[in-house]
Amino acid sequence: MLAVLAVLWYSTVAGGTAFATITGIGDKITSALFADAFSPTAAQGMHILTSRSVTPLHSLAKVVHIATQGLITVGLLATLLKRERWRIEPEYLAVSLVFLLVNLAGIVVPFFASSLNTSRLYHITLIFLAPFAIIGGIALYEAAVERIHALRTAPCMGTAYQALSAFFVVFLLFNTGLIYQIADDSPTSMALETTGDKPVFNGKEVKGAEWLLSEGNRRPIYVDGTRWWLLLGFDPDHQRYLPENASLMEPNSYLYFGTYNVVRESVRIEVKEHAVTEAGYTSAGRFTGDQHKVYDNAGSAVYYR
């Protein structure tokens, strides 16, 4: 009954938008399931696992995350084998097994993870799966101790809880971006790194966007990958991503630059191939050569072609 009511609501009363999105995703997954399974270009999770990290430190972070997923898998198996010890409720265990399958689907099934975003999918599933990383760590530690009896008397071995605590401290430092910030190694935290190109916008950028949307006569507006989020809040119908090739920009269109673009003379170009989006920076001058500047407030600029 709940399923029927949900389908009826989202397909009729709610305008059908959510229903159309879900069915579209399902159709895309079904059509590519066997042809593109495990493909790094179609399965976003597989792309993250197989792609080369920007620095060795980021590669180490990937290893830490993979190790955490390994602990979760071991923890689930240990719980299934010794349910009386870990005392996990059957309902919780069932939901956790489904979430583990969701994580695996994000790696194997094409267009599955990219429909929600892999990092968001990972975050949601960890809400239920996180306790099993502890169980998996304890199970591995006890198995190692049983096989190597000398470890029982080793003075520096400590306990499973101490080893896991040290591991998750490292995990926390990577996830918060503190390690990258200290090492000045491609920082990822918007809270700690405020000088890089982040979707955080100042008053001049907002004023420039307001002027453009009020005076732009509803013409196409080209914007780079980061400033896209600013214009999205004003009018999502007329903005376009900057193409790799400047000649592909439509005539009688506008180009919006934010503070980062103006000061650094650089724009972020995003190229999407199937389920994977690649991003990089290029010179802003490539796009302004044959355009006329029609607005400038020293923090944002608008060009017309």
Image (cartoon, rainbow, N blue to C red):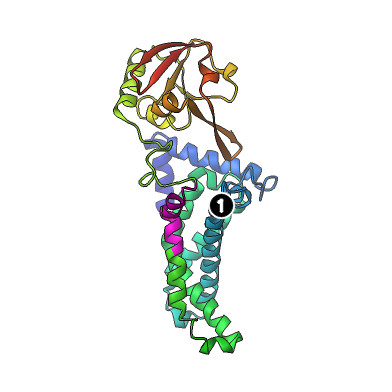
Q: x, y (%) of residue 90?
A: 44, 72
Vertical order, 91 against 299 (above or below): below
The residue most toward the front is 183
Confirm whether the magenta stretch covers residue 175: yes
Confirm whether the magenta stretch covers residue 232: no
The residue located at (58%, 34%) in the rendering is: 272
Vertical order, 234 against 149 (above or below): above
Q: x, y (%) of residue 112?
A: 55, 47
Within 10 Å of disc 1 (Cα), the crowding (few <14, some 14-19, many 20+) is many
Indicate the amino acid at tag 1.
Answer: Gly
Q: x, y (%) of residue 228?
A: 43, 29
The residue located at (46%, 61%) in the rendering is: 171
The residue most toward the right is 35
Mark 1 lies on residue? 106
Q: x, y (%) of residue 117?
A: 49, 45
Quarter location, residue 159:
bottom left
Secondary structure of residue under mark 1: helix
User: Magenta segment, which residues?
Assistant: 170-185
Vertical order, 276 against 173 (above or below): above
Is there any visible trace of residue 302 in the rendered image? yes
